[in-house]
Image (tube, rainbow, N blue to C red):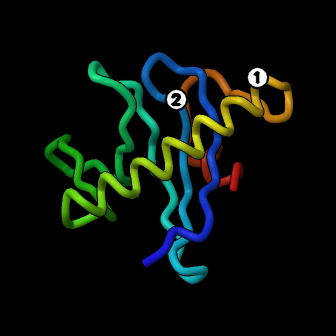
Amino acid sequence: MEITEIRITLRDDEKLRGFASITLDNSFVVRGLKIIEGATGMFVAMPNRRRKDGTFQDIAHPINAFTREWMENLIIAEYKQELQRAERGEVPILSGRHEDSALEESF
């Protein structure tokens, strides 16, 4: 499996630093990954949905630690490159609360 494309939409929220969309093998897209600034550093949260009991369940996710780390490293590296482009004024950083529709429109 190969990640053939990563798209990042930067955010300027307290913990949410951006959204990511990845394409696998030029044939399958996963949207709604979140780049989060956590207490111990950056991590990628998988797309999820809220259950009736208020908890969240991942919709798509790696099934082992190796794949999660590999995917997270690639996404965070692309996030850092996109952040550099924003610092040069090439791309915007969106602020405020995120909406699912805004995420969809950004891709």
Residue at (27, 56) in percent of width and height: 58
Q: Secondary structure at mark 2?
A: strand
Within the image, what quadrant is residue 54 found in? top left
Q: Which residue is mark 2?
A: 17
Q: Secondary structure at mark 1?
A: helix
Residue 81 lies, with reference to residue 60, above or below; the image says above
- Place of residue 98 in the rendered image (x, y in percent of width and height, measured from the top left): 55, 33
The amino acid at mark 1 is: Glu
Depth check, mark 2 against mark 1: the one in front is 1
Residue 45's spot in the image, x, y percent? 35, 44
Q: Residue furthest left?
A: 53
Which quadrant: the C terminus? bottom right
Which one is nearer the viewer's eye here, 6 or 16?
6
Residue at 57% across, 83% down:
27
Answer left or right for 101 relative to 63: right
- Please identify the quarter of the rendering in which residue 99 is found: top right
> Residue 85 at x, y = what percent?
77, 33
**For the residue carrying disc 2, how many other residues have a C-alpha within 10 Å: few (<14), some (14-19), or many (20+)?**
many
Q: Residues within 10 Å of mark 1 (few under 14, many from 20)?
A: few
Q: Earlier in the sequence, mark 2 or mark 1?
A: 2
Q: CA distance from mark 2 to mark 1?
A: 14 Å
Quadrant where the N terminus lies? bottom left
The residue to which callout 1 is attached is 87
Residue 20: % across, % down: 54, 49
Q: Pointer 2 and pointer 1: residues touching (CB < 8 Å)?
A: no
Identified by mark 2, the residue type is Arg
Q: Residue at x 31, y 52 (%)?
A: 69
